[in-house]
Amino acid sequence: MLSQAEENYLKAIFKISEKEAKAATTNAIAAEMQTTAASVTDMLKRLSEKSLIDYEKYRGVQLTPEGNKLATALIRKHRLWEVLLVEKLGFAWDEVHELAEQLEHVQGNGLVDRLDEFLGHPKFDPHGDPIPDAEGRWAFRQQVLLSTLKVGDKGVVTGVDDHSTAFLQYLDQMNLALGAQLELLERFPYDQSLRVRTENGQEIILSEKVGQNLYVKIS
Amino acid sequence: MLSQAEENYLKAIFKISEKEAKAATTNAIAAEMQTTAASVTDMLKRLSEKSLIDYEKYRGVQLTPEGNKLATALIRKHRLWEVLLVEKLGFAWDEVHELAEQLEHVQGNGLVDRLDEFLGHPKFDPHGDPIPDAEGRWAFRQQVLLSTLKVGDKGVVTGVDDHSTAFLQYLDQMNLALGAQLELLERFPYDQSLRVRTENGQEIILSEKVGQNLYVKIS
DNA sequence: TTATATTTTTAGACAAACCTAAAAATATAA
DNA sequence: TTATATTTTTAGGTTTGTCTAAAAATATAA
Ligand SMILES: [Mn+2]
Ligand SMILES: [Mn+2]
Ligand SMILES: [Mn+2]
Ligand SMILES: [Mn+2]
């Protein structure tokens, strides 16, 4: 059985390895965990000792198959709890991350499966992030950043890259929830901002930054 | 903000003080927490420092009003989570205690209130134990031990004193769930065992020990 | 009331997880 | 290639929460 700290490090390494295909560096892990490089080195020794990561001094780390399995299970738990908090308890999508960060560490036989069952086996969490199944398989997402759409393309909001409260609440204000339909009407060359028609026919201007943090599926 | 260990000690002291009206002793707390007296003394100093308990060396401890408030809130959380696990996730009543023991420590604004709302403001948990309301008020239970009934009395099962898996599963086998109706037909003087008619008209024999661990409301 | 038993506290240690500061290794630039 | 900058590790220390063994205080019994 792992401590909460050990679990959190595994998840951090997983996240980093997800973006960059190479070994996760000490500094990258420290940044992700909001701690110091020295603390990370300490923990890497422990995780290596438990065969959850491959670690060579100064060379960064990679999850072993066992470490990968544990990290995946943790993300599954985190995202299932997020679904419960939003779908059943009525939290907003910008309120649930910190709670799920705690709930993901609750250990118990059958808990995850019962949660999954109760929620109807959701494939995506409230932010559009995929929920791996009980065997650790990920649903494939056919989505692109809004910024990559061509003028005239229509799409449906499927997720966010930025999970910050500020961004999520901004999207709420713009009526851009998951599943919202939109059409790219114009891209202004001056600042790459976007004119977009939303579901209710309303036209809004979105900054380049918004376009680079919002995923859509072209329809 | 308190650590999980601090919260658990507060709850242990609360439980002990609930049964015995006098100050909780170091040894009693050690037994409840399944730890050593030395560890308890350490923690009592910390809790006293934080004004959560009144502590005088060798004299045992009592919760301060602040400590009492925190312990009550913790029990409220614990029991609400137990209701969710049984009513929504489908766990059996003997499976939820350890999970709730972890879930009770999850911190988050509005979590308890939303949980309470989602569950329909339950007054009792799956074991018949009362759930204090948001202001820390306890529902009054008009219940007695089955062993105190007179022959001929009828009653309804309202709770258990022993929360062990063994006892709860035994009750399941006897069809003695919460709300089950029963009638005391006979008390054998030899060993104080009880002949009881259950809901479906079936007659069963219950040991003195069972009678002393099962609460009923006389109807 | 004195001796004995029990309870509680102290002393000293340990592991987990963190920190800062300094040293060592690696990467980059002149 | 040598000097400089950056990254990473080590060294040494802290806090929380635990432990065992010994000492001190309190309770019980002769
Ligand atoms: Mn999250
Ligand atoms: Mn976490
Ligand atoms: Mn999420
Ligand atoms: Mn209960």
Image (tube, coloured by chain):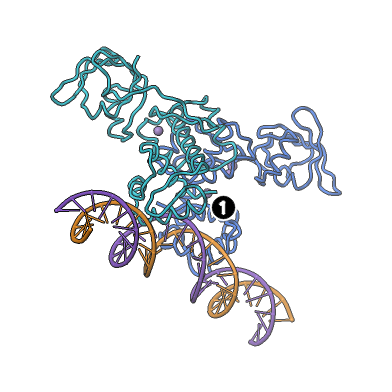
Chain colours: A blue, B cyan, C orange, D purple
Can you give x and y, in whole percent of width and height, for residue B150 in the image? Answer: 25, 17
- Residue beneath label 1, please? A15
Farthest right residue?
A190
Q: Answer left or right for B208 relative to A209.
A: left
Give whichever of B63, B7 is nearer the camera: B63
- Residue A65 visible in the current orientation: no
Q: Secondary structure at mark 1?
A: helix
User: Looking at the figure, which quarter contains the C terminus of chain B?
Assistant: top left
Residue A94 image-quadrant placement:
top right
Say how many tags the image has: 1
Can you give x and y, in whole percent of width and height, for residue B81 in the image? Answer: 47, 34
Tell me which residue sits at (31%, 35%) in the image: B164
Q: Quadrant of ligand 3?
A: top right
Chain identity of mark 1: A
Compared to residue B181, the image places residue B112 above or below, namely below
Residue A157 image-quadrant placement:
top right
Q: Answer left or right for A22 relative to D19.
A: right
Tell me which residue sits at (15%, 22%) in the image: B189
Tell me which residue sits at (55%, 30%) in the image: A88
